[in-house]
Amino acid sequence: MAFYNDPKGMIQDIIKTHLVDALRHLYKVDASQTITLEKTSSDYEGDFTFVVFPYLKASRKNPEQTATEIGNLLKDSFIQLQSYNVVKGFLNLQIRPDYWLQFLSDNYKKSNFGFAEPNSKQAVLVEYSSPNTNKPLHLGHVRNNLLGFAVANILQAGGHIVKTCNLVNDRGIHICKSMYAWMQWGKGETPDTSNIKGDHLVGKYYVAFDKQYKREIEALVVEGFTKEEAEKRAPSILAAQELLVKWEAHDEETIKVWKTMNDWVYAGFNETYKKLGAHFDKFYYESDTYLLGKEIIQEGLEKGVFFKKDNGSVWIDLTEDGLDQKLVLRGDGTSVYITQDLGTAELKYKDFKCKRSIYVVGNEQEYHFKVLQLIALKLGKTYAQGIYHLSYGMVELPHGKMKSREGTVVDADDLIEEMELTAAETTRALGKMEGESEDDLKVLYHTIGMGALKYYLLKVDPKKKMMFNPEESIDFHGNTGPFIQYTYARIRSILRNAGQLSTSDFNKQHIELSKVEKDLLIKLYQYPQVINEAAKELSPGLLCNYVYELAKVYSQFYHDHPILKEANPDQKNMRLFTCELSSGVIKSAFALLGINVPEKM
RNA sequence: GGUCUCUUAGCUCAGCUGGAUAGAGCAACGGUUUUCUAAACCGUAGGUCGAAGGUUCGAGUCCUUCAGGGACUACCA
C-alpha cells in the first residue's frame, strides 16, 4: 500500500521509476536525475504526461515512435497503467481508477491526512507581527499577521517543530511622540474616559503630534530656515527627543507615562490579535533587548570583522559583498537597529535553539536583513545560515501607499468590523439562516467576514505587493473565502443528512468513475504534496490556490452527481467517502490558513 | 548615481524545476432551481504575457539591453 503522506511513495515517483527503467532498457540512457513528469493538460486524455523530446537524440527515432515505444514497454511492466496515448512528443498516461479508489478508502477517515510526520524536520522559529506601540494596526500589519500565522502552521503541518515570537517595538522616538502629545493636550484622557480602544487613543496622539510638528516646521521655514533645519529645531521634536533621553535615564515620571500608554496599546492589540487569531509562543520587547548586541560588537572588533572610526563609531565594510559600509554602533556607544537585532538573534537562538529563524517583515527591510545575515556569517554564528527574511510586498491602495501620518490607512479594526457587517447583510439577504440564535449568527458573521478577508490577503504570493481597493468591498463570490466555506457547509449538510457513514468499504468493481469524480480524487490526492510545497516555499498562496481548485471541482461534482439519491450502494458509499475527505481537506487547509469553516451558512 | 524588485484579459490575480491551443475570479452578455444549500453550475466575449534581441527541438518562465512603476541606499526603526 502506498504511503500517501510521503511524497516519495507517490504515483508520480512510481511512474518516474518505470520511465527511467524503460529509457535505460530501450535507449541506454540514465535519466534518473533529469526525468520530469507533467500533469496532463485537460484537453487530452490522461492523468500524467511524459515529454519525450529531450530523449530523441538517444532514441534516434521521431517523437511519435519514441513515445509509442516507451508507452508499449510501460503497458507491460507497469500494472497500474490503464492506457496510454501519444500526441506528437507527448506520452499521456492514464492510471487505473482502482488506484484512486484505493487511495480514497485508505484515507477518507484520517484526520491528519496530508500532514507530514510531526517533528520529523528541523525546528524553525517564526517571528511575525512585530508592531510599533504608537499606533493601531492597519491593513499592512494584517497581512503580516496572517502570513506569519499561516506560515507557522504550514511548516508545522510539513513536519517541522515550530515556535512563534513577536518582537514588540515598545520604545523609541515614535512612542515619545505620542507620549509628548498626550502629556501636552491629553488632559488625563484614558481609554475608559474617552471610550476609545487603547491603541487607537495612543494613535490619536501620534497624529496630533505630527500635526503640531508640521505646523512648527512651516512656521520655521517662513522665518527663513531650510526645511531640514526646521525639522531638527521644531520645539515638539526637541521635546520628544528629551523624553527619549529621560526614558533612557530611567526617569520615573517618564517611565510611568510610557508604561501606562503601552498598556493601553497592548490591551487594544490583544483584542485585534484575538479577532485575527494570531498566536505567539513568546513576546520580546525592545525595551528589554535594545541594549543587547554590544558584546557582539566587541567580539566583532576582536575578530577584525568590524573597525572603529576616529569618533569611536563602529562599522563594517560590506563593499566586497556589493553593499556599503554600515554603522553598527554609534560614536557615543549607543545601539542602532542592527546592533540590537544582532543581540536579539543571539537571544532567540539561546531561547529556542532553532537553526532556522524566519523573520516575517516587509520588503522595505530587505537591505537590513542582508546586512544582518552577512554580519552573522562573518562572525561565524551557527545560526547565521538559517536567518531568513520572509519579505512580503506592501499592501497598496488605489491612491498609492498607506501612510499613517497622512491618514491614508485602512485600519485593521474598522476593516474587520466592516467585513462582519457585509457578511451579516449578505447572509440576511439570502435568508437561509433564519431561526438560528443571535449568538450563533454572530459567530457565523465573524467566520465568514474573516474568511473573506484572510483568504483575500493570503491568496496573493507573499513576495508580491498587492492592491486593496476599499471602495470595492471584498467579494463573497468566485475565488473567495466564503465560496470555499460555502462548499464546506454544503458538504456538511449532505453528511448530516446521510447520518452515520457506512463502515463497510465499497466494492471497486461496482463503481464507474466519472471524469469529475476522478478529477476530484486526484485533487484530494495532491493535498500532501501541496502542504509540502507550501512549507518549502513558505507560501500560503499555494494552499489558497489549491483549496480553491478543490472547492471548484467539488462544486462541479456536487452539481453533476446525486449523492444521497444514488441507487448503486457502492457508488453512493464512494461518493459519501469523497464528501468526507473533501470536507476534511477543506477544513484542514483552511485551518492552516487560520480560517474557520461553518457547518451551515 | 548604485543595489534589488515588479510589468500576464477592462480590474484583481494564478501559471510548480522551460513543454501541447497562456488560465481563474470580478465586471459584461446568455442559460440552469417542483430534485442533497443558486454564496452554486454551464456557456459567450475578452491577450502582441511592458518592448527588442538571444539561448533552446520548444520561452510567460532562462540571459542581455531598453522603457515604465516600486523599494532600499541615515550615527531612524
Image: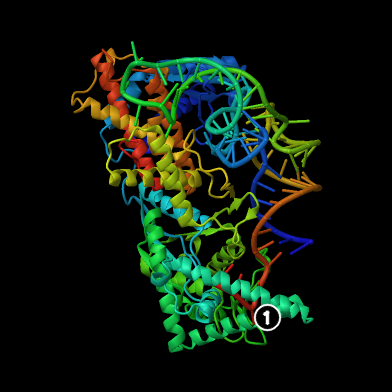
Q: Is residue A306 left or right of residue A340?
A: right
Q: Residue at x 22, y 23 (%)?
A: A505
Q: B29 or A534: which is nearer to us? A: B29
Q: Residue A40: x and y, percent?
A: 51, 24
Mark 1, Cα crowd under 10 Å, few <14 / some 14-19 / many 20+, is: few
Q: Residue A568: x and y, percent?
A: 26, 13
> Toward which corner of the image does residue A531 lie, by quadrant?
top left
Q: Residue at x 42, y 47 (%)?
A: A420
Q: A165 or A499: which is nearer to us? A: A499
Q: Is residue A439 left or right of residue A523?
A: left
Q: Is residue A470 left or right of residue A321?
A: left
Q: Residue at x 55, y 67 (%)?
A: A372
Describe the element under mark 1 as helix, strand or loop.
helix
Is residue A183 in view from this perspective? yes
Q: Residue at x 51, y 36 (%)?
A: A33
Is residue A104 in view from this perspective? no
Q: Residue A485: x and y, percent?
A: 38, 37
* The N terminus of chain A lies in quadrant: top left
- Disc 1 is attached to a residue of which chain? A
Q: Which residue is mark 1?
A: A232
Q: A41 or A441: which is nearer to us? A: A441
- Residue A500 against residue A426 in the figure, above or below: above
- Residue B20 against residue A412 in the figure, above or below: above
* Total numbered labels: 1
Q: Residue A561: x and y, percent?
A: 36, 18
Circle 1: residue type: Lys
Q: A515 or A216: which is nearer to us? A: A216
* The C terminus of chain A lies in quadrant: top left
